[in-house]
Amino acid sequence: QVQLVESGGGSVQAGGSLRLSCAATGSIYTPNSMSWFRQAPGQQRDLVARMYGGAVQYADSVKGRFTISRDRAGKTVYLQMNTLEPEDTADYFCHMIIRGVDFWGRGTQVTVSS
């Protein structure tokens, strides 16, 4: 049973940093795609950053502040978030595609206070 286990959320003041982690457990296969989404209260879930086929994609709102990366084994994805803003407050969800199947983490909360 594949599970995505997230960690690293929390509360921080504006201008601060957080690093999110998401590990894929229960799979012997390397994900084809690794992404982070976020969902603020009352809002839709939006893509924050994605790694796919050697390419990296970021939402315009986080370019230059957030960095997505993965470990050498290719089963853990990170999101380094710098210069955080109150607008970054949301639940952050890890998403991976493994052999054509979508997997989601349960989400980790990020709160940025002004």
Image: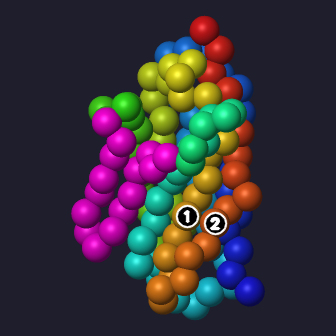
Residue 44: quadrant of the picture:
top right
Magenta stretch secondary structure, dominant: strand
Q: Which residue is labeled 1 in the image?
A: 95
Which amino acid type is marked by label 1? His
Instruction: Using the image as rendered, state which of residue 17 and residue 37 is in the foreground.
Output: 37
Q: Determine whether 108 is above or below 69 in the image.
A: above
Residue sitting at 48 percent across and 42 percent down? 80
Determine if residue 71 is in view: no
Say left or right for 44 vs 53: right
Residue 70: quadrant of the picture:
bottom left
Q: Determine whether 8 is above or below 24 in the image.
A: above
Q: Where is residue 54 in the image (x, y as percent from the top left)?
A: 26, 69
Q: Determine whether 71 is above or below 99 in the image.
A: above
Residue sitting at 66 percent across and 41 percent down? 91
Is the Cβ of the residue at disc 2 closer than 8 Å to that at disc 1?
A: yes
Q: Which residue is labeled 2 in the image?
A: 104
Residue 26: quadrant of the picture:
bottom right
- Looking at the rendered image, the quarter that the N terminus falls into is bottom right
Q: What element carries label 1?
A: strand
Q: Determine whether 87 is above or below 54 in the image.
A: above
Q: Does the magenta stretch include residue 14?
A: no
Provide the residue span drawn in magenta: 46-60
Determine if residue 93 is in view: yes
- Looking at the rendered image, the quarter that the C terminus falls into is top right
Q: Is mark 2 on a helix, strand or loop?
A: strand
Q: Is residue 49 magenta?
A: yes
- 10 Å crowding of disc 2: few (<14), some (14-19), many (20+): some
